[in-house]
Amino acid sequence: MKHAKRIFAALLAVLLITIAAAPVLAASGSDVPSPDDVLNQLGGGKSINANQTMTALIAKLVAAIKFVQSWMGVIVLVVVIIGAILAGLGMAFNNRDLKRNGVGTIIGAVFAYGLVRLAPVVIALLMRST
């Protein structure tokens, strides 16, 4: 049981490092704007109405979703592998909790992947309503 907990902790640490490193690596190549810079870009130094604000915010949201989608495949693959390892260890050591955690990890990763892939549909619905 002690070994399974150590393995789980090590795999969880690798997962968290992978997730934490993705935005850092992406941001290291470009300048990250401050909130004031973003507001100035949205308004162009002049007042804007609600439709222009919504359009600009949706454009920023679409860019963020595309960025997340570009990394989502890698992240889901790592999480599914971790879940498979956990489930395999649970089966090998006859540990129901570990097996359940592994299967739940795989299901959660696939569900998250589906949500991120469907995000453009939600954005399209938002753009149609404005």
Image (cartoon, rainbow, N blue to C red):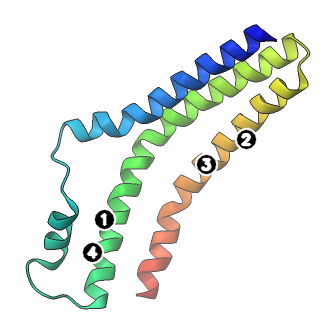
- CA–CA distance in space, label 3 to label 2: 9 Å
The crowding category of the residue bearing disc 3, from other C-alpha atoms within 10 Å (few below 14, some 14 to 19, many at least 20), is some
Identify residue for label 2. 107
Q: Earlier in the sequence, mark 4 or mark 3?
A: 4
In the visual, does 128 lie left or right of 13?
left
Identify residue for label 3. 112
- CA–CA distance in space, label 4 to label 3: 26 Å
Q: Amino acid at mark 1?
A: Lys
The crowding category of the residue bearing disc 2, from other C-alpha atoms within 10 Å (few below 14, some 14 to 19, many at least 20), is some
Q: Earlier in the sequence, mark 4 or mark 2?
A: 4
Q: Earlier in the sequence, mark 3 or mark 2?
A: 2
Identify residue for label 4. 56
Determine contact: label 4, label 3, CB under 8 Å.
no
Seen in the picture, residue 81 relative to 32 is either above or below; the reply is above
The residue lying toward the viewer, choosing from 59 and 101, is 101
Occupied quadrant, residue 7:
top right
Q: Earlier in the sequence, mark 1 or mark 2?
A: 1
Identify residue for label 1. 60
The residue lying toward the viewer, choosing from 62 and 93, is 93
Q: Quadrant of the C terminus?
A: bottom left
Determine contact: label 4, label 2, CB under 8 Å.
no
Q: Which element carries disc 3, helix, strand or loop?
A: helix
- CA–CA distance in space, label 1 to label 2: 30 Å
